[in-house]
Image: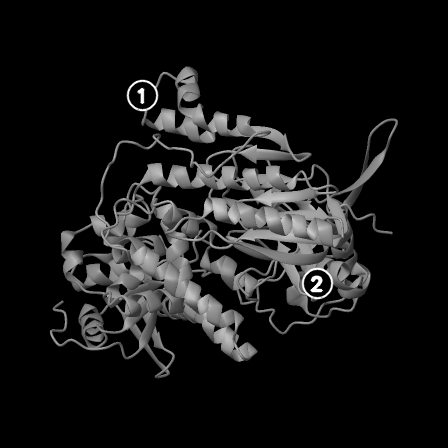
Amino acid sequence: MAPSDTPGRMKYMIFYDFETFKYDWLVVLQNPVAKTETIIHNDPEKLKKFYEENVNDVWVGFNSTHYDQYILKGISCDFDPKEINDFIIAEGNDGWQYSRLFRNIPFNNYDVMPNPPVGLKTLEGFMGLNIKETDVPFDIDRPLTEQELQMTIEYCRHDVESTIMVFMNTFDVYNATMGIIKNYNLPLSDLTLSESRITAKVLGCHKHDYGDEFNYEILPCIRLSKYKYVQEWFESALEDTKKITDSPIGSYEFNRTFYSRKLETMVAGIPHTFGFGGLHGATAEPCHKKGLILHVDVNNYYPSLLIAHGYVTRSATNNQYQEVYKTRKALKFKQRHAASKEEAKKYKKAQLPYKKMLNALSGAMKDKNNLAYDPRNNNIMCINGQLMLLDLIEKLEVIPGFELIQSNTDGLIVQIPDTDEAFDAVDDICYEWECRCSTDQCDIKLELDVISEIYQKDVNNYIWIDEDGGLERKGAYVKSLSALDYDLPIVNEALVEYFAHGTRVETTINTCDELIKFQKIVKLSNKYKWVEHEHCNPIMKVTGVRVKKEHYFYPYTKRYSYKCYRVFASSDLEDGRLLKCGGARGKPEKFGNTPEHCFIDNDDVRTAACPDKLDKQWYINLAIKRLKDFGVDYV
């Protein structure tokens, strides 16, 4: 296929998906702006023509970076698409390895698959869409019948339409990536790159192997006394690892041993864990606090630290990282001083490309395949970031009545007496810390947010109410849900309503008639082969001698081969457990966090009402259990 010689700007976005069989292949291509759909079946010339007419457009797919684009390129090169399919799927190779000719085919591919990866069927489940799978087996050893072809087209069309919905729900991510490409005059084909790879390109990075991964240093601004032993633990890590393993420094075994080590200790009366990732500390038991609570947050912590102390990757050949930092800082200032909410929203949105670049560098410096690779500087950043926060805790701990609630990678949550003296003491200590840790190259600033009430399960699960009544939510139980992360939403909603407004969980759950809010999405992993649903009139069995227990036994099950299931709690005793089968243990196992009695609905449930057999009490009980995990004695 000859690429277009005429340069041009992107006109449209083409959403596409391939289905590949031994004797058949087809692709559905949709242009939602022009409202057109093209279906191509076993016609290479038609595909080549379509490509040439749309070579300057962005082609959007799901997992297309690893699969669909190589099927298209392979057909363009007159290769057998089934061979490419098997090379990628069955043999586990990367598509680009199949042929060097693929490099000669320009292609503006954008992949909407999330990172970390989540399957399309799972996302379709979250969005309430039909998640039934095709009945046409992909390993069919003959040409498709006309009926099978139409079924496959419908299945493929559904996935393309789902891809469009995923794109619309993650448009800010696309917009941020496109913002970087436009702001730094990168080619449109860079849309296929990860944020960390685009960042390395903007910084003009050239790959180096410095050979000094463990030659990190402790910054002179850190002045520990009571907790100096934590600093010494980091300083002795290299020698200590040598004593544990005789593997050569830099080998896989040595690095695994080095980075897996952790120091667990008490700091300010709460358990802490230090390591080579980030700082984590929280009260041993769940807590609920009211009073003067402060969120002490380091503003742009890692980017600020890297710039202030000169540890931006040594592989960079320009100062673009510093310029990106300044640009984002200026936009953030405009956001805070905006005249209206609409204007503030505009400046917040404008920050996203720069924010993503700043945060992407951290991971890039630890990625051996990234041009920004610089593990020593990453270690310096992670170690000193933890010690600087520990330094702050040590200084704050002397304030009478001070209580540490939690520590995390870039900030603290503390409680102090509600007095001017205590607040001024915090303010003075934070100011001294800022002055000591900042440099002429960059300020490292702290922000103090006032919290009126906090419920905390652990360092990764909490909800707080700020002084203006706003909510900050973190963790699976209470996080803010999106259309692409919509699992047991009614339980999440019940907890948040209880914490924020004191609404009883029974009220929230019993008054809801939206079936989608009660869904639990489960997926069969590759460790299992099929699924069975206990579904028949059960037999009551009694077990035990002294303590007798009654339970239901289901002699018959329904067998399914789908990967994804939308599960609901059922009050119908004919509905039993959903079981994953064919695993290494040799016996059926219940899917985790699913009811003992459940029903399956893999159809579209976006507008469905709750049926009579929906067991709302199961969701109420689960919500109460989760409240208890937060330390709430719910009565």
Which mark, residue 248?
A: 1
Is the residue 536 above or below the residue 208 in the image?
Answer: below
Is the residue 294 above or below the residue 509 in the image?
Answer: above
Marks 2 and 1 in Cβ contact (< 8 Å):
no
Residue 484 is left or right of residue 289, and the answer is: left
| Whether residue 168 is visible | no
SS of the residue under disc 2:
loop
Answer with mark 2 or mark 1, whichever residue precedes in sequence. Answer: 1
Residue 144 in the image: state x and y as whole percent: 33, 63
Query: Residue type at mark 1?
Result: Pro
| Whether residue 469 is visible | yes
Query: Which quadrant holds residue 518?
Result: bottom right
Query: Which quadrant holds residue 492?
Result: bottom right
- Neighbours of disc 1 within 10 Å: few (<14), some (14-19), many (20+): few
Residue 158 in the image: state x and y as whole percent: 44, 69
- Neighbours of disc 2 within 10 Å: few (<14), some (14-19), many (20+): some
113 or 344: nearer the eye? 344
571 or 10: nearer the eye? 10
Residue 309 in the image: state x and y as whole percent: 38, 45
Residue 179 is left or right of residue 499, and the answer is: left
Residue 213 in the image: state x and y as whole percent: 33, 33
Residue 572 is left or right of residue 443, and the answer is: right
The residue to which callout 2 is attached is 467
Q: Residue at x 43, y 69 (%)?
A: 331
